[in-house]
Image: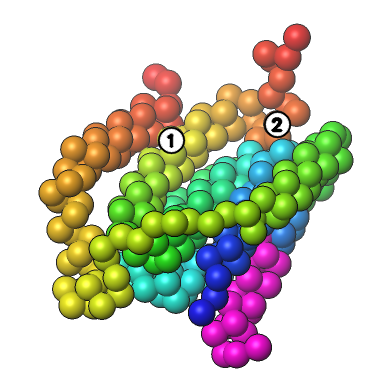
Amino acid sequence: MIPLSWYIGLSAVIFIIGLIGFLVRRNLIIMFMSIELMLNSINISLVAFSHYLQDIKGQIIVFFIITVAAAEAAIGLAILVALFRNKNSIHTDDIAEMKG
Amino acid sequence: MNTVELFFAYFAVSMTLLSVLIISVKNPVHSILLMLVLFFHIAALYLFLNAEFLAAVQVILYAGAILVLFLFVIMMLNLKEELMSHRFINEWPIGLALGLSIIVFIFFALDKFNPNYKGTYTIEAIKAETNTKAIGKILYTEYLLPFEIASLILLIAIVGAIVMAKKEK
């Protein structure tokens, strides 16, 4: 039997990799994919909790997270398409109008 | 090391490697294809944790819908310029240091964690009425209102995506 903390550790590692990817990449698409990575790592930890604490509500929450992730991807990519049409670039350092 | 631990070790190592590759390869198409492999690994991990319904949803929804959406958007963007330019922002060491410091904190806190709770859904109870039926029962009774709100979120996402991606007349 694998201890629960191994799953939490794996989930934490993937979450942090997603966080680093979101912070260091210039490309907006890869930043969106890093967000998906973070959401998936949370899903892993929730399913692991659901199995080890013998409560199926964790899997229900994963179901809702997947719904929200799909909505977020659709809206985010629509913003990306609109941005590329106006700016002709998807790099974060080309979009700095709000910078003081 | 027994077989179960060996399986978990394979999943842990390959998932970590895949995630590192996803955020570091230059071509976004490659990183999406690597993400497809990662999602299949995650689905296998769900099967490992007795969540068959979620494993199927992971493959159908994430691998089948969201990644295809990403691929379609990349098709519309200019990749030639992307392959020429820098991958990372100039301040990348700050982001890396921040992430690594958080992971150190998490790993110190990991073995202090001791859940002291046992629910009623044991493996035998779920096996008796199958995983999908157990999820469906609780989703349509106790979580009916959040379920309806989820449908509203999807509706807003559809309308928002169409409005934002539409060309101005």
Q: Secondary structure at mark 1?
A: helix
Chain where mark 1 sits: A
Which residue is painted at 38% across and 34% down in the image? B161
Q: Which residues are magenta?
A: B1-19
Check the image and report above or below for B87 versus B53: above
Which residue, as the protein is rendered here, is positioned at the far bottom? Answer: B2
Magenta region, mostly helix, strand or loop? Answer: helix
Q: Nearer the viewer, residue A35 or A9?
A: A9
Task: Please name the residue that numbered disc 2 is placed on.
Answer: A92
Secondary structure found at label 2: helix
**In terms of image quadrants, where is residue A11?**
bottom right
Q: Chain of mark 2?
A: A
Number of numbered discs visible in the structure rendering: 2
Specify whether B134 is left or right of B55: left
Q: Position of residue B6 (x, y in %)?
A: 62, 85
Give me the residue at 46% from left, 43% from top: A73
Tell me: residue B118, above or below residue B37. Answer: above
Instruction: Kindly identify which residue carries mark 1.
Output: A75
Expressed as whole percent of the image width and height from the top left, the position of residue B4 reads: 54, 85
Q: Amino acid at mark 2?
A: Thr
* The C terminus of chain A - image quarter: top right
Q: Residue at x 64, y 77 (%)?
A: B9
Q: In this rendering, would B39 be left or right of B94?
A: left
Viewer-proximal residue among A15 and B30:
A15
Q: Is residue A63 left or right of residue A81?
A: left
Is A71 magenta? The answer is no
Earlier-in-chain disc, 1 versus 2: 1
- Taking the magenta stretch, the answer to whether it contains residue B11 is yes
Residue B45 percent location from the top left of the image: 48, 72
